[in-house]
Image: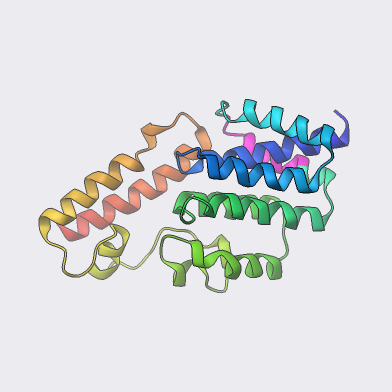
């Protein structure tokens, strides 16, 4: 495989992972990706990336994230890697904010691309406003590498995890738990990588509910 094709397939790989991460594929995401590709790639590369992207959106391969990032590191310079990460963040936030699963995926991609800490911190600060969970936790000194799972066992934190406030009634808690447990249940995907991410989120939700019962 020539370097350009390897780079193109790697880019299509990471973009497809971000699009699939929250379980929704929207027109806004596709338009955002298309605009980025049209602005940064030659026509033949654009066509190849789009073809690969269409295929990748149908693939569930637990090793895909590692392989795609390896290809990018081999065939992109550092500036291109940073530009790619900004594109991924832009795609993730276009659906009214960055879902915790998307945030975790972006953290893993940044780690696999071996970005420098100052750039991780910069991107973390820039996009933290779009993060739909605990922003203060997600944007601390370790940046995006922070796990979305919290260690605080307080009732207040448990309510936050379930998206509730201090005035929530027992019925509210049960309803929120059922909704989130259904959304983040690992059995909702066959993708090995996404199963790991969903399993972590599902455990967090279950533990929060147990503390509130």
Tell me where residue 33 appears, x and y as whole percent.
65, 44
Tell me where residue 149 appears, x and y as whole percent.
41, 58
Q: Quadrant of the N terminus?
A: top right
| Residue at the far left in the pictured view | 170
Question: Quick one: 207 or 198, which is closer to the camera?
Answer: 198
Please tell me which residue is depicted at 30% across the width and 52% down the height of the picture: 205
Tell me where residue 71 appears, x and y as whole percent.
77, 40
User: Does the magenta portion include 96?
Assistant: no
Q: Which residues are magenta?
A: 61-71
| Residue at the far right in the pictured view | 2
Name the dominant secondary structure of the magenta segment: helix
Please tell me which residue is depicted at 82% across the width and 48% down the height of the picture: 76
Please tell me which residue is depicted at 84% across the width and 40% down the height of the picture: 42
| 131 horizontally vs 165: left or right | right
Question: Quick one: 210 or 49, which is closer to the camera?
Answer: 49
Tell me where residue 6 appears, x and y as whole percent.
80, 34
**Relative vertical location of residue 137 with respect to residue 74 in this rendering, above or below:** below
Question: Quick one: 179 or 113, which is closer to the camera?
Answer: 179
């Amino acid at each position: 495989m020539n370097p350009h094709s390897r780079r193109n397939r790697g880019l299509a790989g990471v973009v497809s992972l971000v699009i699939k991460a929250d379980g929704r594929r929207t027109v806004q995401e596709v338009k955002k990706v298309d605009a980025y590709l049209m602005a940064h790639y030659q026509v033949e590369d654009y066509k190849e990336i789009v073809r690969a992207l269409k295929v990748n959106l149908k693939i569930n391969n637990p090793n895909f994230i590692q392989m795609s990032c390896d290809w990018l590191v081999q065939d992109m310079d550092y500036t291109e890697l940073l530009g790619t990460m900004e594109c991924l963040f832009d795609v993730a936030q276009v659906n009214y904010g960055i879902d915790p699963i998307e945030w975790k995926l972006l953290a893993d991609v940044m780690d696999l691309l071996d970005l420098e800490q100052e750039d991780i911190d910069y991107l973390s600060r820039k996009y933290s406003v779009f993060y739909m969970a605990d922003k203060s936790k997600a944007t601390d000194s370790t940046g995006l590498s922070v796990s979305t799972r919290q260690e605080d066992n307080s009732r207040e934190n448990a309510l936050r995890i379930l998206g509730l406030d201090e005035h929530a009634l027992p019925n509210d808690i049960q309803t929120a738990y059922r909704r989130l447990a259904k959304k983040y249940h690992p059995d909702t995907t066959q993708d090995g990588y996404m199963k790991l991410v969903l399993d972590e989120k599902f455990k967090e939700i279950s533990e929060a509910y147990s503390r509130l019962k």
